[in-house]
Amino acid sequence: MQLLADGQFHVALVDIRMPGLDGLQVLTRSREISPNTQVIIITAFGTVDSAVEAIKLGASDYVVKPFVFDDIIIKINRLLDMQRLTAENTFLRTALGEQYRFDGIIGESKQLQALLATVEKLARTRTTALIIGDSGTGKELIARAIHYGGITKAGEFVAINCASMPENLVESELFGHRRGAFTGADANKPGLFEIADRGTVFLDEVSNMPLPMQAKLLRAIEEKQIMPLGATEPVSVEARILCATNADLKTETDAGRFREDLYYRLSVVEMRIPPLRERREDIPALIDHFVAQYAGELKSACRGATDNALRAMMAYSWPGNVRELKNVIERAMIFADNREIDVGDLAFVSETTEGAPQADSDLRSAVRAYERQHILQALTGNNFDKAATARALNVGVSSLYRKMDEFGIGKRPPKQ
Ligand SMILES: Nc1ncnc2c1ncn2[C@@H]1O[C@H](COP(=O)(O)OP(=O)(O)O)[C@@H](O)[C@H]1O
Ligand SMILES: [Mg+2]
């Protein structure tokens, strides 16, 4: 007992029958003073009851006398493997947590600072939240910050993309299935809700969730229970749900493609991440952040951007938002010849200068070149959604189409 209290034993082999303290008492004490020590109990042949008792008290395994040595070696090795995995898991979780701390989210704009304040409040609760924003604005990053920044961090963070998952797989993925539930289900499989018990389930592009699945999700949220496919009994789970969407869920609801009751359940708290072009003051800090990150990863000597490059990045519309900025910086740092990224290293510059007015062209053609460029940028920024672009440009949809014809702009984004 003294050794147990002093030292760090991975595994203890304990006979049940001993003078003084018996094995079960040693087991109980050991669970208290050295909870990481795995205990294997040695019982005499014919005393199964005490083995059962030992397992209930927290023994990891038992062997029956007379025993075979190899058998014990196998059992010990199994326990050691398990401990290694647990330690590794704890380590990885801490590392992940660090990676997703609030300070990994860069942004000085008022909008982002307000979002961070909400993240901090949400992290203290298990409240459901809906994160709305265009692709690449940082929805998943925010979701992870909420998870790793608070009470859910001891549990798992699991993400599922509702748009890329075939309809018939979503349910088994989320709720799991029992062996034999359908052809090919040859083993029990826990669903993401079970894996994320006490943690977070992140439903990405939730507007694409099939309607029948929406009904099941609603029930799961309301009853805090799920029904794995092929199961006869529901399973209780306590997983926090965070959802992301780039579509307007309210519109989807009005159009009957999204259940209204589910929408209200999911949007207890709504967080809107504005596109990058609406918070340009975040761009310099993001550039610094990604330059520093890639300087390490790419072993690059590049330490920043020239004034011209910075100006170009401040002026660009960033249809792909922060994800695009990150990629532009990575590419620029691979190609930059100097210690600073220059305009020519920026991927989007070659695309945008094509069609830009020549310095010596007459006013009319310069204006036309500018007009074409402006429309193209607006279209790109709105994913070629003509109605949204027309609104942004404050012109009618039909005149937008007329201009597109006139300038030879296609109806879809040009291939990269
Ligand atoms: N404010 C931010 N600070 C630092 N990195 C960010 C920020 N916003 C987005 N990113 C990075 O941009 C990329 C895209 O973010 P992500 O969360 O996947 O966007 P979304 O889920 O909205 O498409 C990720 O690599 C993410 O780490
Ligand atoms: Mg995403």
Image: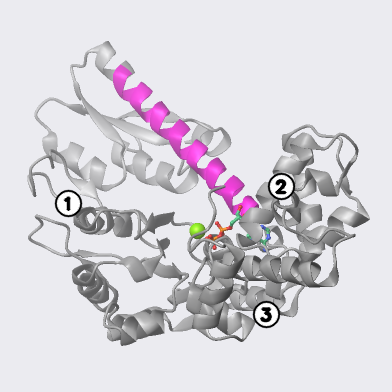
SS of the residue under disc 1: strand
What amino acid is found at the position of numbered circle 3 in the picture? Ala
Q: Which residue is denoted by mark 3 in the rendering?
A: 114
SS of the residue under disc 3: helix
Which residue range is magenta in the image?
A: 74-101
**Of callouts 2 and 3, which one flags the residue occurring earlier in the amino acid sequence?**
3
Mark 2 vs 1: CB contact within 8 A: no
Q: Alpha-carbon neighbours of circle 3 within 10 Å: few (<14), some, or many (≥20)?
A: few
What amino acid is found at the position of numbered circle 2 in the picture? Ala
On residue 399, the disc is: none
User: Looking at the image, is mark 2 or mark 1 nearer the viewer?
Assistant: 2
Badge 1 residue CB within 8 Å of ligand 2:
no
Seen at 80% across and 67% down, the residue is: 366
The quarter holding residue 316 reads bottom right
Where is residue 183 drawn, in percent x and y? 7, 42
What amino acid is found at the position of numbered circle 1 in the picture? His
Q: Which residue is denoted by mark 1 in the rendering?
A: 177
* Viewer-nearest residue: 382 or 102: 382
Seen at 30% across and 80% down, the residue is: 262
Badge 3 residue CB within 8 Å of ligand 1:
no
Residue 233 shown left or right of residue 123 in the figure: left
User: Looking at the image, is mark 2 or mark 3 nearer the viewer?
Assistant: 2
